Image (cartoon, grey):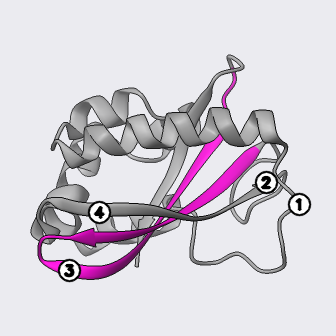
Amino acid sequence: MIKTLRLAAILLIGGVLTGAGAKTPPDKEAAALAVAEAWLALVDAGDYAQSWDEAAVLFRDSISPEQWQEVLDAVRRPLGETRSRELLSTSYWTELPGAPDGHYVLIQFDTSFENKRNSVETITPMLDQDGKWRVSGYYIK
């Protein structure tokens, strides 16, 4: 289980960035934000398998559906229902640690859960191989 959580920590791009991202182009920001919110709705509903299916190739190549289920059962499920989620920031990146160069939007939400009032969710949609925005990373702090 520890190995799985470490793998997830590596996969879940978010808490290790240094420097500042570029100003997010408005069209990329809107597309990435819409994808992030739809994907988070799947996670909120406990539909972890579907969240894996709809994630970026980079994400799916880094963690199996079974490992993803284990990680979310261990980390996300104990937080309980999402009570509120407010957008904190977005930043556009073309380079992220441990990820290939590409187009990424790092999005942070101030989120309150049933069992944890103050959290920051970081979700990283990327422009995937087929030209569609998909989630490549998810991190809760």
Q: Which residue is mark 2?
A: 92
CA distance separating discs 3 and 1: 31 Å
Nearest to the observer: residue 64 or residue 105: 105
CA distance separating discs 4 and 1: 28 Å
Q: Is residue 124 above or below residue 5?
A: above
Quadrant (top left/top right/bottom left/bottom right) for the N terminus: bottom left
CA distance separating discs 2 and 3: 28 Å
Determine whether the residue tagged by mark 3 lies in a helix, strand or loop. Answer: strand
Q: In this rendering, which labeled residue sits more in front, label 4 or label 2?
A: 4
> In the picture provided, is 77 more to the left or to the right than 49?
left
The residue at 24%/81% (across/down) is 117
> In the picture provided, is 9 more to the left or to the right than 113?
right
- Crowding at mark 1 (Cα within 10 Å: few <14, some 14-19, many 20+): few
Which amino acid type is shown beneath numbered disc 3? Lys
Q: Is residue 43 above or below residue 115?
A: above
How far across and down, in percent of the image, does residue 67 sit?
26, 50
Q: Which residue is mark 1?
A: 22
CA distance separating discs 4 and 2: 24 Å
Q: Earlier in the sequence, mark 2 or mark 3?
A: 2
Q: Earlier in the sequence, mark 3 or mark 4?
A: 4
Determine whether the residue tagged by mark 2 lies in a helix, strand or loop. Answer: strand
Q: Is residue 83 above or below residue 110?
A: above
State yes or no: discs 1 and 2 in contact (Cβ < 8 Å): yes
| Magenta-drawn stretch contains 126 | yes
Which amino acid type is shown beneath numbered disc 1? Ala
CA distance separating discs 1 and 2: 5 Å
Q: Which residue is mark 4?
A: 84
